Image (tube, rainbow, N blue to C red):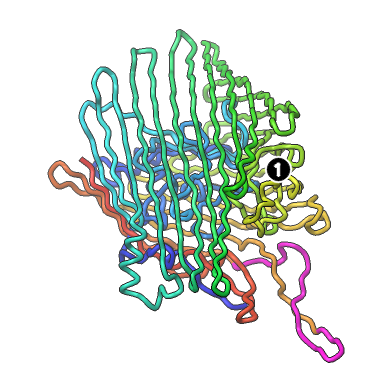
Amino acid sequence: MRKTRVSLLVLLPLFLPLFARAQETVRTDTLRSAIKTEVRSEVRSINKMEGGGGIIRGVLSPMGEGDPIRWSQTLPGISTGADGSSAMYVHGGNMGNNLFSLDGVPVYGYSHILGLTTAVPSSIIESASMTKGGFEGRYGNFTAAHLNIITRDSFSERFHGEGTLNNFLVGACAQGSLGRGMSFIASARISPIGLEYKALRNLLPERLAALQDISSGVGDIYGKFNWTIDSRSSLSASALLTLDRYGFTTGEGSRDGLGWDNQIAIINYRRIFERTEMEAQAYVNRYGTFQSQEKNYHGSSNVLSLCSSMLEGALSVDFSYRNPFRWELEYGARARYALFVMGPPSSHSGKGTMLVSPYAQVVRDIPGRLRMQAVLRGNGYLNFSDGVVRVRPDVSLSFKWNISKPLALEGSFDYIHQYYHTLEGLPLGWSTDVIVPSGRTAPPEYALGGNLGFSLAMGRHTVTLGGYGKRMVNLVYYKYAQSLFTDAFAGWEWSVETGQGNSYGGEFLYEYVGKNLYLRASYTLSKTDREGFATINGGGKFNARFDRRHVLNFQGQYGGLSLALTVQSGHWENAAPLTYQIHLPALETETWFYEGINNYHMPTVFRVDLGYGRTFHTGRFMHTVSVGVCNVTNHFNPFMLYYDVTSDDWKMLALLPILPNFSWKVAF
């Protein structure tokens, strides 16, 4: 089987710098101080990991700057899609089963640069948390995991600014006081990919001959206003705008394009009473996708295009009550209305839905001994196109029992529902990036799962070991994903099937935090399958596409040096690994033999990343310069298998070759 290397170096001129960085850490004076303060602030448990902004930015990344997705992908229980992409599959769920949120508000188009990084700029991030079980009551409408980013508040009395530059993005961030308890933080980034491509095309015309022209528009803008009204109340307003647009010509007048965008506006109000804290939130959230193909067939132009969008508005109120007897009570509700538009631009068949979710959450905390959490959430869902009301409960239970000072037993149980579907296809496992509502033919997805494990803390060493099991029902498969560019997509409801999935496995995490040395290793052993789809494998079981049996990640920091290693089992592809002879009158030929679905195991993913970072001052300015190399060994990690009719052979495509990267940040 031939290997064909196709990389983002061609699409996104990544080889601009000849040296690069894969680590950035928030520092005060020295790296030693950064490791001591930032790493130890990380919250560790079987169900949840939380890290500060310095922890997030310190993860090695192809962008030369860490982000919440890269950080999450190093944790146990999580496997990736294509090596180098932002796709995550948690405890056997689909990519669309994860909730990615900004201050609790969903961000549906959360990636930049074709998945190389997060659409949320790292300069505004205060912390991030990844929850895989024992979910909180105020968040819902997902069945796998929740990655929540908390943004920074600026309370500084003086103006602060910073500029950033890496392989693909140029950005600036500013924050300061406006007086009378008011402050702001603002950020903007833009990608010079188009200019980089033009420069490289002049230098390397033969290497880039396959792509005659590349156009792009990539950037984001964020702003946040804070007002501390008095000692008990505060108000904040924020907005995030992101844009990703790509187009390239492949010859003979043929041109392809794709993109996505987000427009999010959020208002938050907090009020503290004697024993109760109230938070009210309102947001408007629009997410859109765009795909197009312009093909020239024998002198005639054929234009195919597809747009989809969803517009969501929500109101929520949450109360937190704590009494002197170590009981905590949280309760509230969220009501959201969403409008979906699918199909070509000529289609305007919007589908409206309403989801109302009241909840109650009780926490019992006995310091040093036991912590228990119980959540009950009701979901009332209405799709206005079919007029059917669906009422479903969500239940989440979790506990942590400190058996002794270093040893604890942890566990969780979750029964949760999801009412928005990200369509999967080809034949199952690849996301179309199109989000659709639950309805008559696509009922709400739900998952039933739990985990149990031990955690051990001994001085600078921390170890967690546990196992999980999960059952997923009503997973949605779109049968005609290869025909998205047709008017038939407007009636997608009649082209979907639902099935089930099962996943179980074990997880291990080891962490060492020293004065100059930091080490972390995680390992996941798991098995994930799918079944019950009428037109796939006769309804029988088959391997989930991204069922990576073994996932090993290692990270190490010493001084300014960083190293990261990932080894993952290959995912599953549809292939025809055998051939047989056909004997017919006047015809004898050879053809491929197909058997089963997702029947070919792709090669193991292996990647080593190196990085070095240094911080220094020049007057009022603090500089952080980092260089590194991603995929140092240039290992071929294919993400796709396809049959080339021209060469009459099967070929593999890889996404991420050896990639130098560079990052420079100046702050004042």
Q: Residue furthest bottom?
A: 586
Q: Is residue 598 magenta?
A: yes
Q: Is residue 92 visible?
A: no
Where does the image place residue 258, in percent across and percent down from the top left?
A: 51, 55
The quarter of the rendered structure image containing the C terminus is: top left
Of the pair 28 and 160, the residue shown nearer to us: 160
The quarter of the rendered structure image containing the N terminus is: bottom right
The residue at which mark 1 appears reads as 470
Per the rendered image, the range of residues in magenta is 582-603
Answer left or right for 72 relative to 198.
right
Q: Residue furthest front?
A: 300
**Label 1 neighbourhood size at 10 Å, few (<14), some (14-19), many (20+)?**
many
Count of picture labels: 1
Q: Is residue 271 visible?
A: yes
Q: Residue at x 38, y 61 (%)?
A: 610
Where does the image place residue 480, in percent across and percent down from the top left?
A: 70, 56
Q: Residue at x 71, y 62 (%)?
A: 598
Of the pair 81 and 435, the residue shown nearer to us: 435
Answer left or right for 468 relative to 31.
right
Instruction: Say which quarter of the image contains residue 296.
Output: bottom right
Where does the image place residue 228, in percent across and percent down from the top left?
A: 33, 18
Q: Residue at x 58, y 18 (%)?
A: 331
Where does the image place residue 633, in percent across and percent down from the top left?
A: 44, 70
Q: Residue furthest left?
A: 619
Q: Is residue 512 magenta?
A: no
Q: Residue furthest right?
A: 585
Q: Residue at x 71, y 50 (%)?
A: 477
Q: Is residue 259 above or below residue 637?
A: above
Instruction: Say which quarter of the image contains residue 468.
Output: top right
User: SS class of the residue under badge 1?
Assistant: strand
Q: Amino acid at mark 1?
A: Lys
